[in-house]
């Protein structure tokens, strides 16, 4: 019978903890995704990532403790760095967070005309810190994103109330043609509740090798349908993302020369 | 002087890198005649290694007839760098190399082709004023339109991937099948859209208008084939740049075969030397109005017993087996054959199907005049072909080319909705003195000068430079 040396046992336990952590992180991810099926895909993805990271942090700390390293000092250092970072970047973080939430929940986009407190103009940029407006007298106005959340805004673009915009983020290698196709077919079922003059539109906002950021725009017919439709559209988008999970763009490879057919 | 200097400056500029996009591919690859599965073309091939007429053929139709000579001319002038051309071509290698040009073929999965074909036919029929399906106004919400969007998305993704390697200066997108591409590629680089089919705002369903305008707004410039279509776009609500540029052909692609060769072709088709030949060159499609020509022939037969109607053309890429595969061409031909039989003129109508350029040239030389009987026609380049052969044409007044015709001077016009109009104009031409018909044909040949590559290449080059310069 094989006998393991005593010094190796903590490492084996640590490895088992890491394996368990991976399993639990995966399960938690699934649970969060299911629970947030009617939220904006970008929010659901963020929540899932947060929950998964939290499980991994706990798991790794337990594994580290298992092999005899004290995590107390590590935790104190991490906490101090965190507090310092929050204090130093409070304003920026506030704006950054506000941008994230306004992107998902506030009904305006680049190109809209909005009024925020004393400011009014056409939105020409939404960055991590502020929303940039072009005023009617050609001046640039930078409105802090936190101010938009605090003060509220008036979107004075024609028919702005009709517009639902849903940010979607998918991995960079995802083939978006099948996703768009699924979304269009699925939302076709909601057409009695949507403005028939404006079919769903999926536009690409940003692309990196890691992710593709898309915006889905649909136009509702009646203002009172806005909330239930937003939930229903989100649900259908989640389902479309799931159905097309396997559709990826093949990595480019050099094209071999073909001989002419005989 | 300043203009001349500016032109000279522009001519010294680096060649412009353009990516062209159309649904119809320049080259269609031919399946073996035994009906067995075709050869494996691999992923990339040089066209020079293949045989025209055996392995491939150049696609018939106006778009490819225009774009290829344009690329050839501008690349030869070094106004363009070697170009790239993306189109739908499922039964083809991924890329095909031709001097000055690389063709990139997009494959749409077979299970999506039917839906795509239905959606684009619904757009085509509506814009051409043909009978609209009951649910056509809801087209953009259908599964078929989702396939149309799918095709446009995969085309756009292919163009984007190419752009990442080639860093194009301009995207030049052709025709309604590709309309969403401008928005889908999402690039900030200049984009030109060429609208080839008719455009009258009153034919566009209310539910389509906002979407069409949104797609058009993604382009820096929209090119139309006649002034009237530009007014149609304005009526729709499009406020961007519009240019009118007549479509064009390369006269070097046409020849005037000697009488001996013309006689041989006619004998093979059963045309007698004393027949009065009237020619219609148009693909088999209800929008082309062949039935009107057959009815006019039947009514003129008692007074002109030797009159023969020759119908040249079969399906477009939409009907081709290796293309979209819609059955409308075969259905329309069966309908026309039945109609000719019913009217007692079956033996006076010849259906040639698709013919080689040489046979087509022979038929132009043999005919007395040509007819373009379409219910609605984007432009009508076959009229220009007829003019290049110095044959007068009777043209529907619903074609873009009608804008160039002064009735009785360089051609004859007719209203396709007037059942007697075509017959009257045919009678007028058949009764005219030989000298006056020749004079009309000569004036028509002069008019053709506005629709040839030499004139158009200059205009296209200026258009492209202007778009790139902003």
Image (spheres, grey):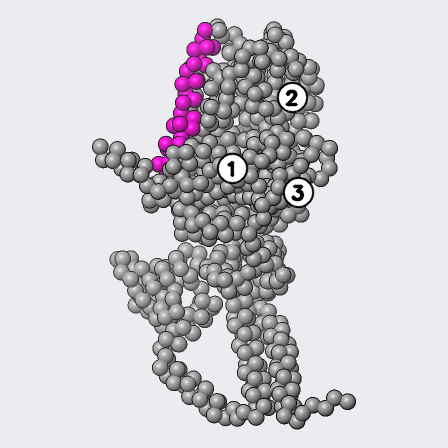
Task: Determine contact: label 3, label 2, CB under 8 Å.
Answer: no
Mark 1 surroundings within 10 Å by alpha-carbon count, few (fewer than 14), some (14 through 19), many (20 or more) = some
Q: Position of residue A30 (x, y in %)?
A: 62, 73
- Which residue is tagged 2? B351
- Which residue is tagged 3? B40
- Which residue is tagged 1? B98
Host chain of mark 2: B
Q: Say above or below: B465 vs B382.
A: below
Host chain of mark 3: B
Can residue B139 be seen here? The reply is no
**What span is colored magenta in the figure?**
B435-464
Looking at the image, which residue is at 68% across and 22% down? B337
**Residue A90 occupies quadrant:** bottom left
Query: If you read the primary sequence from the N terminus, does the residue marked by circle 1 or circle 2 appear first?
Result: 1
Q: Say above or below: B368 vs A230.
A: above
Q: Position of residue A42 (x, y in %)?
A: 52, 68
């Amino acid at each position: 019978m094989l006998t393991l040396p005593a010094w190796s046992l903590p490492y084996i336990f640590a490895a088992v903890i890491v394996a368990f952590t991976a399993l639990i992180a995966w399960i938690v991810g699934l649970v969060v995704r299911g629970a947030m099926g009617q939220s904006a895909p970008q929010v659901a993805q963020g929540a899932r990532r947060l929950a998964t990271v939290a499980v991994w942090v706990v798991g790794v700390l337990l594994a580290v403790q298992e092999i005899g390293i004290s995590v107390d000092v590590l935790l104190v250092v991490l906490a101090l760095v965190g507090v310092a970072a929050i204090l130093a970047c409070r304003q920026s973080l506030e704006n950054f967070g506000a941008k994230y939430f306004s992107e998902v929940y506030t009904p305006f986009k680049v190109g809209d005309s909005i009024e925020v407190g004393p400011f009014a103009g056409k939105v020409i940029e939404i960055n991590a810190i502020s929303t940039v407006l072009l005023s009617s007298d050609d001046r640039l106005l930078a409105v802090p994103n936190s101010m938009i959340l605090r003060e509220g805004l008036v979107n004075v673009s024609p028919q702005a109330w009709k517009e639902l915009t849903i940010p979607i983020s998918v991995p960079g290698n995802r083939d978006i043609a099948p996703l768009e196709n699924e979304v269009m077919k699925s939302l076709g079922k909601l057409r009695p509740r949507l403005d028939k003059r404006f079919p769903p539109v999926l536009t690409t906002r940003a692309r990196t090798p890691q992710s593709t950021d898309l915006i889905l725009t649909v136009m509702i017919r009646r203002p009172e349908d806005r909330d239930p439709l937003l939930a229903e559209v989100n649900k259908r988008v989640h389902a479309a993302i799931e159905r097309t999970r396997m559709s990826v763009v093949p990595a480019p490879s050099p094209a071999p020369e073909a001989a002419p057919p005989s | 002087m300043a203009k001349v200097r500016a032109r000279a400056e522009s001519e010294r500029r680096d060649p412009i890198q353009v990516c062209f996009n159309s649904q119809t591919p320049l080259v269609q690859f031919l399946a073996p005649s035994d009906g067995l599965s075709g050869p494996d073309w691999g992923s990339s091939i040089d066209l020079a290694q293949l045989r025209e007429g055996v392995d491939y053929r150049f696609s018939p139709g106006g778009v490819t007839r225009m774009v290829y000579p344009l690329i050839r001319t501008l690349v030869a002038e070094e106004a363009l760098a070697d170009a790239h051309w993306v189109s739908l071509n499922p039964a083809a290698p991924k890329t095909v190399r031709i001097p000055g040009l690389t063709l990139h073929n997009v494959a749409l999965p077979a299970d999506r082709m039917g839906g795509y074909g239905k959606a684009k036919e619904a757009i085509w029929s509506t814009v051409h004023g043909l009978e609209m399906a009951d649910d056509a106004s809801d087209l953009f919400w259908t599964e078929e339109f989702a396939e149309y969007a799918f095709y446009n998305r995969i085309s756009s993704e292919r163009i984007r991937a190419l752009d990442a390697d080639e860093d194009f200066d301009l995207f030049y997108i052709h025709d309604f099948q590709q309309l969403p591409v401008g928005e889908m590629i999402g690039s900030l680089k200049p984009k030109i859209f060429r609208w080839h089919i008719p455009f009258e705002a009153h034919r566009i369903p209310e539910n389509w208008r906002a979407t069409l305008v949104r797609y058009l707004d993604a382009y820096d410039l929209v090119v139309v084939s006649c002034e009237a279509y530009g007014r149609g776009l304005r009526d729709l609500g499009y406020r961007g740049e519009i240019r009118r540029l007549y479509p064009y052909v390369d006269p070097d692609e046409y020849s005037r075969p000697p009488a001996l060769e013309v006689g041989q072709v006619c004998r093979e088709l059963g045309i007698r030397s004393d027949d009065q030949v009237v020619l219609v060159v148009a693909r088999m499609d209800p929008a082309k109005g062949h039935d009107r020509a057959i009815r006019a022939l039947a009514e003129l037969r008692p007074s002109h017993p030797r009159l023969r109607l020759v119908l040249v053309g079969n399906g477009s890429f939409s009907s081709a087996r290796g293309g979209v595969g819609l059955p409308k061409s075969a259905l329309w031909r069966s309908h026309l054959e039945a109609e000719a039989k019913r009217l007692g003129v079956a033996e006076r109508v010849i259906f040639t199907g698709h013919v080689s350029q040489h046979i087509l040239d022979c038929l132009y030389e043999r005919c007395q005049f040509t007819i373009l009987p379409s219910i609605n026609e984007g432009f009508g380049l076959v009229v220009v072909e007829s003019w290049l052969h110095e044959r007068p044409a009777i043209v529907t007044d619903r074609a873009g080319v009608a804008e160039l015709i002064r009735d009785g001077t360089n051609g004859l016009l007719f209203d396709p909705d007037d059942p007697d109009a075509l017959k009257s104009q045919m009678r007028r031409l058949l009764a005219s003195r030989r000298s006056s018909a020749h004079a009309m044909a000569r004036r028509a040949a002069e008019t053709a000068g506005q629709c040839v590559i030499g004139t158009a290449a200059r205009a296209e080059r200026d258009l492209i430079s202007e778009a790139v310069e902003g």
